[in-house]
Image: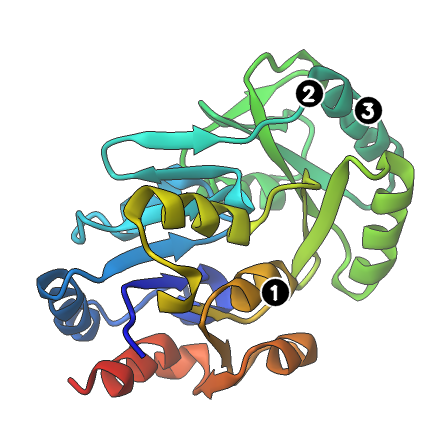
Amino acid sequence: MTIKLVATDMDGTFLTDDKHFDKERFSHVYDYMTKNGITFVSASGNQYYQLKDFFKDFPKTLFVAENGALVGSHDKIYKTDTFSHDVVQKTIKVLNSLDDVQSIVCGEKSAYIAKNVTPEFAKMSKFYFPEITSVDKLEDVTDNILKFSINCPPDETEAYMEKLADMIGPTVSVVTSGHGDIDVIRADVNKATGLDYLSDKLNIEPEEMCAFGDGGNDLEMLRYVGHGVAMKNASPIVHETAPFETVDNNQQGVIQHLEELFEI
């Protein structure tokens, strides 16, 4: 099989639990991919600006950010898929009505949090969203909205996912990477739609792509590509979906699998 594009999820996949990766080891893989015309893509629910910072030393990296709602390079945003104003307002109203939920509204220019969030949530938000703005009311944000990022009690994740899907309706898709983190995105947007855009742009067939993931928001991407790889630490549904497996994220499973795949 000829691989022309490699896409990887970040948290729980490319990154270790302490949010790092072996840059020296990855540099060898990245150099091989660059020399052989293989495109490397960071495909994540995370903010575009955070992903660019992670890969600032790897300038040819492309990005499928915000769970597929934004596709771009280091230099340019290629496309965005945003919500209608009505869906934004309805979603914010639903989020405001739920106890034990704290929310981030993710826009093209910045992410936004309410000023009354807990200090712990504010600190966490600034790590994942380097471009973030505190506002009095989320309803007053005028940016084009890509996604809603929600934090709930971890042991209630599935219940809140069902509640959000029911209350907001079929215009949205509710996905999780686990651990109480939930994303609300457009129903017609996911990481696979981002890769499909790159397939057309770069003239690369899905069968020529490899992807890595560990959570529910990776399923469409893993089904889309020809070489889908589950992390050892992935959820059961990911293992059922991906035909291949690598060691866990703390053992640099993505890098190890690529070293084996490319025989480097």
Question: Which quarter of the figure has residue 2?
Answer: bottom left
Name which quarter of the figure residue 52 lies in.
top left
In space, the residues marked 2 and 3 are separated at their CA atoms by 10 Å
Q: Which residue bears the numbered disc 3?
A: 90
Residue 69 in picture, x, y percent from top left? 53, 38
Inspect the image, locate mark 3, and give the three-letter code of the amino acid beneath it.
Lys
Q: From the viewer's perspective, is 89 left or right of 99? A: left
Task: Identify the residue at image location x=72%, y=23%.
Answer: 88
Secondary element under disc 1, as helix, strand or loop, is helix
The answer to which of marks 3 and 1 sits earlier in the sequence is: 3
Callout 2, which amino acid?
Ser
Local crowd at mark 2 within 10 Å, few (<14), some, or many (≥20)? few
The residue that mark 2 highlights is 84
Residue 172 badge: none
Asked whether the beta carbons under mark 3 and mark 1 sit within 8 Å of each other, the answer is: no
Callout 1 environment at 10 Å: few (<14), some (14 to 19), or many (20+)? many
Between 151 and 263, the one nearer to me in the picture: 263
Image marks 2 and 3: residues in contact by CB distance under 8 Å: no
Nearest the eye: 92 or 174: 174
Q: Quadrant of residue 205?
A: bottom left
What residue is rendered at 82% in x and 61% in y? 158
Tell me which numbered mark, 2 or 1, is placed earlier along the sequence: 2
Front one among 115 and 72: 72
Residue depicted at x 34% and y 38%: 72
- Residue 65 in the image: state x and y as whole percent: 45, 44
Q: Name the residue under label 1.
A: 219
